[in-house]
Image (cartoon, rainbow, N blue to C red):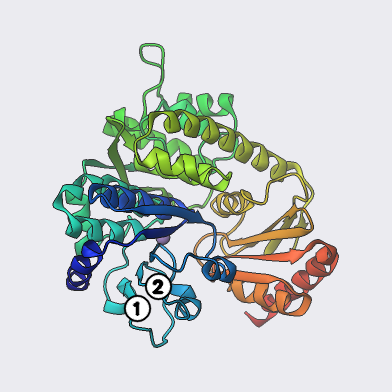
C-alpha cells in the first residue's frame, strides 16, 4: 500500500488544478481533512474542503466538474456513483469496498485492497501526507486522534506503530475514563465512556466513589487519572468494579494516549469526543479549525462540548426514569422529542455498556426529528443477536433506511409508522429469541 501511495503523489503534486477535498463528519474524517488541508497548504495548492455527514448521490452529482476530487474517510461505498464522474479522483478510505471495475481516473488507497491492517482514514491520510513532504510528520498527532476516534487503538499493527512513533505522545496503561488529564470528580461525573450507576451524572455520587476508593483532595482539588499512583489506580478500579455488577472491567482498562495539543498534553479520547460533539451538533467547521490549531475555535469547541455533555447526561437521566417497553431480551426506549436524534446513538452506546442490562440484551432507542424517527440499536456486551438484520427486516416491511453492523445498527423511518414499527419490532425480537 505504501508503494501505491508513493506512486500516486508525483502526479497529484505536479498538477495545477484546484483540488476539492470531501471528508466525513466524524472525528476520523475531520482529522483526515485537517491533515490534508495542512499538507496542501504547505504545497501552496489551490483547494477547498467540504465536510459531509454522508456521501449521498445528490452530493456526488453536484460536485464541480473542473477540479481534482479527493475523498477522505469515505468514498469506498459510493464507487458506483463515482465511476460516472470524469474528474481525476483520489479516494483515501478504510471502509468496505465493493468488487467493481474502476475507471482509470479513480485512484484508491484502501487497506482492504491490500490485506493490510485496518488503519483509520486519518492514519491513511497521514501516510499520504508524509510521502508528500516529510515536514508533515508533525501531523501524526491528528492521525492518533483519528485512530482513537474510530476505536482502532486497541489493535495497532506495524504501520500504525510507525505513526505512533512519529507522534508526540505518551502512552500510559490505566482506566479508560476520560479526560485522564482533568480532576477525577469531574471525569467521573461527566463520563460518557463508562456508565457507573449513581456516579455518572451526579457530582455527589462521584465524590462518594472517590471517598470509597480512599482518594481525597490534594491542594484543594482531586487528582487526575494520570496523576494516580499504582495503589490509588487499583483502589479506584475496585471501587468502580463494585458498582458495575458483572461487567468485565478489562473492557475498561487499556492504553491512555496523551497527545500534545495546543502545547499541552491532552487525553486523545477527550479530544476525539470534543471534535465529534462539535460535528454532531452541526459545527463541523469549528471542529476542523480546532484540529488546525485555531485558538478561537478551541474556545468555541469547549463551549459546544460542555453543552453536549449536559445534553448527554440529561438524556441519560431521562432514559433512567422514562417508561420502557421491556421484553425478555430486549428493551425499547422511545424518547420521542426528549432526546435529540443526533445524540441518541451515543446514548444507546452508553446504555449498552451500563450494568443495567445483561449481556446480549438488544437496546433500541428512538428519537423524533420533524416527520422522521431515528432509531439506534445496540447489543449490550459483546455477544447477542444480529440487530442489523432485525432492523433491516422491519424496515423492509414498513419502509425507511437502515444500516450498520451486527451489534450496532440504526434506521430512519417515517413518524406516522411509529406504532407499526414498535409492534413489528417487538414481534421480530421475540421470534428471533425463539430461534436462538
Ligand atoms: Mn473512519
In this rendered view, identify the residue nearer to me: 255 or 141: 141
Question: What's the residue at 82%, 63% (across, down)?
Answer: 418
Residue 397's label in the rendered image is none
| Above/below status of 255 relative to 80 | above
In the rendered image, the vertical position of residue 145 relative to residue 385, given as above or below: above
Residue assigned mark 2: 87
Instruction: Name which of mark 2 and mark 1 comes first in the sequence.
Output: 2
Q: Label 1, on which residue?
A: 105
* Residue 223 found in image quarter: top left
Q: Quadrant of the N terminus?
A: bottom left
User: For numbered disc 2, what is the local secondary structure?
Assistant: loop
Please report the residue visible at 81 percent of the width from the left and 61 percent of the height from the top. Answer: 415
Name the residue rendered at 69%, 59% in the picture. Answer: 374
Quarter for ligand 1?
A: bottom left
Element class at badge 1: loop
| Residue 333 x, y percent position in the rendering | 73, 54
**How far across and down, in percent of the image, does residue 305 sit?**
52, 35
How would you rate the neighbour count of disc 2 (Cα within 10 Å): few for under 14, some for 14-19, many for 20 or more? some
- Give the Cα distance between marks 2 and 1: 7 Å
Q: Nearer the viewer, residue 256 or 113?
A: 113
Of residues 394 and 240, the one drawn nearer to the viewer in this rendering? 394
Residue 176 in view: no
Tell me what residue is drawn at x 57 percent, y 59 percent.
Answer: 380
Badge 2 vs badge 1, beta-carbon distance below 8 Å:
yes
Within-10-Å neighbours for mark 1: few <14, some 14–19, many 20+:
some
Compared with 257, 102 (above or below) is below
Amino acid at each position: 500500500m505504501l508503494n501505491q501511495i508513493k506512486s500516486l503523489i508525483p502526479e497529484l503534486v505536479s498538477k495545477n488544478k484546484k483540488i476539492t477535498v470531501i471528508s466525513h463528519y466524524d472525528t476520523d474524517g475531520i482529522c483526515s481533512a485537517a491533515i490534508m488541508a495542512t499538507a496542501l497548504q504547505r504545497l501552496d495548492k489551490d483547494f477547498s474542503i467540504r465536510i459531509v455527514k454522508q456521501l449521498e448521490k445528490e452530493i456526488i452529482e453536484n460536485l464541480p466538474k473542473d477540479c481534482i476530487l479527493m475523498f477522505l474517510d469515505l468514498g469506498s461505498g459510493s464507487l458506483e456513483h463515482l465511476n460516472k464522474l470524469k474528474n481525476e479522483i483520489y479516494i483515501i478510505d478504510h471502509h468496505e469496498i465493493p468488487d467493481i471495475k474502476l475507471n482509470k481516473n479513480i485512484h484508491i488507497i484502501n487497506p482492504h485492497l491490500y490485506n493490510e491492517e485496518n488503519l483509520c482514514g486519518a492514519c491513511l491520510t497521514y501516510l499520504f501526507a508524509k510521502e508528500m513532504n516529510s515536514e508533515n510528520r508533525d501531523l501524526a498527532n491528528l492521525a492518533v486522534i483519528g485512530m482513537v476516534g474510530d476505536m482502532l487503538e486497541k489493535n495497532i499493527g506495524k504501520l500504525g506503530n510507525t505513526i505512533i512513533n512519529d507522534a508526540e505522545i505518551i502512552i500510559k496503561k490505566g482506566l479508560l475514563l476520560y479526560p485522564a488529564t482533568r480532576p477525577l470528580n469531574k471525569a467521573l461525573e461527566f463520563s460518557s465512556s463508562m456508565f457507573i450507576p449513581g456516579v455518572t451524572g451526579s457530582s455527589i455520587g462521584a465524590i462518594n466513589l472517590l471517598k470509597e476508593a480512599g482518594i481525597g483532595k490534594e491542594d484543594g482539588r482531586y487528582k487526575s487519572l494520570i496523576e494516580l499512583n499504582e495503589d490509588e489506580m487499583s483502589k479506584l478500579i475496585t471501587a468502580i468494579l463494585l458498582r458495575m455488577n458483572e461487567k468485565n472491567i478489562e473492557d475498561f482498562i487499556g492504553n491512555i494516549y496523551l497527545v500534545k495539543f495546543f502545547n499541552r498534553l491532552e487525553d486523545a479520547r477527550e479530544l476525539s469526543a470534543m471534535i465529534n460533539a462539535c460535528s454532531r451538533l452541526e459545527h463541523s467547521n469549528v471542529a476542523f479549525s480546532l484540529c488546525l490549531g485555531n485558538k478561537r475555535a478551541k474556545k468555541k469547541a469547549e463551549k459546544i462540548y460542555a453543552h453536549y455533555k449536559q445534553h448527554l447526561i440529561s438524556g441519560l437521566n431521562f432514559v433512567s426514569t422514562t417508561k420502557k417497553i421491556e421484553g425478555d431480551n430486549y428493551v425499547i426506549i422511545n424518547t420521542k422529542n426528549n432526546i435529540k436524534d443526533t445524540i441518541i446513538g451515543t446514548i444507546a452506546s452508553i446504555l449498552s455498556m451500563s450494568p443495567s442490562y445483561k449481556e446480549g440484551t438488544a437496546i433500541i432507542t428512538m428519537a423524533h426529528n420533524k416527520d422522521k424517527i431515528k432509531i439506534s440499536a445496540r447489543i449490550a456486551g459483546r455477544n447477542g443477536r444480529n440487530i442489523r438484520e432485525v432492523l433491516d427486516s422491519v424496515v423492509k416491511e414498513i419502509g425507511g433506511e437502515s444500516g450498520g453492523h451486527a451489534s450496532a445498527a440504526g434506521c430512519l423511518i417515517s413518524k406516522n409508522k411509529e406504532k407499526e414499527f414498535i409492534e413489528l419490532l417487538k414481534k421480530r425480537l421475540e421470534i428471533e429469541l425463539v430461534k436462538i
